[in-house]
Image (spheres, coloured by chain):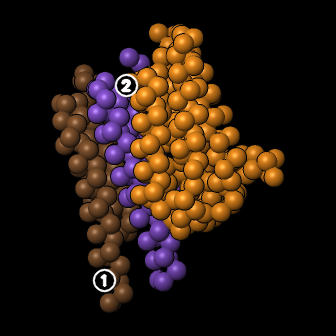
Chain colours: A orange, B purple, C brown
Amino acid sequence: MLGEILHILAAAIISWILFVTVDILFRLPEAGGVSGASAVARDIEAGGGALAGGIMMGNIVCSPDASAGTLLAACGVYVAGIPGGLAAAVLVFIGNRICHDPGYAGTTGAVLATFVVYGFTQVGFAATDFIAGMVIAILTIQGLSHAHASRLLARLWRVRQ
Amino acid sequence: MIALYVVAAIAVFAAIRATVERNTGRKLPYVNVMNFAVAGALVLLLDHPLSLVAAAAYFVGSTLEANAIASTYAGGGRRE
Amino acid sequence: MNDLLAFLFAAVALIGAVSTYFQRDRFNKLIAVGITFGGIVPFIVDRGYLDVAIITSLIIPITTIIILLICRREIHDA
């Protein structure tokens, strides 16, 4: 019981680092890939947040990016192992094209997350820990405090620049 | 199976936060958290290969819905 | 699915339904309808009707987009 909770928290930290790194490497905070992202960014900035972080949060809302790729790859590894994760990457790629997003952040994140999740299932983690961990990770970015989360993402974006 | 309870509780929390928030642009990230939670719960509820397709279809569909609402909101805000 | 999980997902659907009633803005109303569907789809999957879940997940966004187009035209005319 307690061990499972600790596994979920560790998985949350791992998937948080994974998807924020992939998103920032693919320059998501730079510009709104779709027109809705800039509207979300404008409202987050009006609520006291930073613009670069708001654009990244708007991109996460409007198109399946690395966070969606990580979640669906964990789901794929849970139902079918490595082939399931790669099937999830294909589904994320189709989803990106449906949402008019030209980027490859979601597909790359899904492929990377497949191998990360599969590697951690070999050392005692369950794939379900990563599904719950990814939901906790997205909660910390999008669901607790938009002002603080966007300032944190903007600070990480300045470091990358 | 504690993961399923965590995911369901986060879905309820995100739905409450999305309802309480007044601003449309700040509502959408909370709805996005709920979509993540429900997509994860679909796979955890039923361990079957087609569950992955159902979760992906739900997630992509709800993302498309949020995308359409946000882009109409952006255009409508300028016109009004 | 046990009673606690059924309660939690039903809470999501009910929050969405009650919120739809109280929202005034049309975007907020559509978002609340989306929350309602998010609470309903776990019940469909729990019974094993995965094909029904897939097809409704694809149809609901299309209806939302059609409603958005109708809303936009109404404002344009008015």
Residue nearest the viewer, comparing C5 with B19:
C5
Classify A2 as above or below B73. Answer: above
Is residue C6 visible in the rendered structure shown here? yes
Classify C28 as above or below A128. Answer: below
Classify B67 as above or below B77. Answer: above
Classify B34 as above or below A86. Answer: below
Is residue A147 visible in the rendered structure shown here? no
Q: Is residue A153 left or right of residue B80?
A: right
User: Can you identify the residue that label 1 sits on?
Assistant: C74
Tell me the chain of label 1. C
Q: Is residue C64 left or right of residue A62?
A: left
Asked if the residue at tag 1 contacts the one at tag 2, i.e. Cβ–Cβ closer than 8 Å, the answer is: no
Residue type marked 1: Glu
The Cα atoms of the two marked residues, 2 and 1, are separated by 46 Å
Name the residue located 28 percent from the left edge and 49 percent from the top edge: C57
Residue type marked 2: Val
Q: Is residue C67 left or right of residue A151?
A: left
Q: Quadrant of residue C66?
A: bottom left
**What is the crowding at mark 1: few (fewer than 14 residues within 10 Å), some, or many (at least 20)?**
few
Q: Secondary structure at mark 1?
A: helix
Q: Secondary structure at mark 2?
A: helix
Name the residue located 35 percent from the left edge and 34 percent from the top edge: B52
Name the residue located 29 percent from the left edge and 61 percent from the top edge: C62
User: Can you identify the residue that label 2 sits on?
Assistant: A79
- Give the percent coordinates (x, y) of residue B80: 47, 83
Tell me the chain of label 2. A
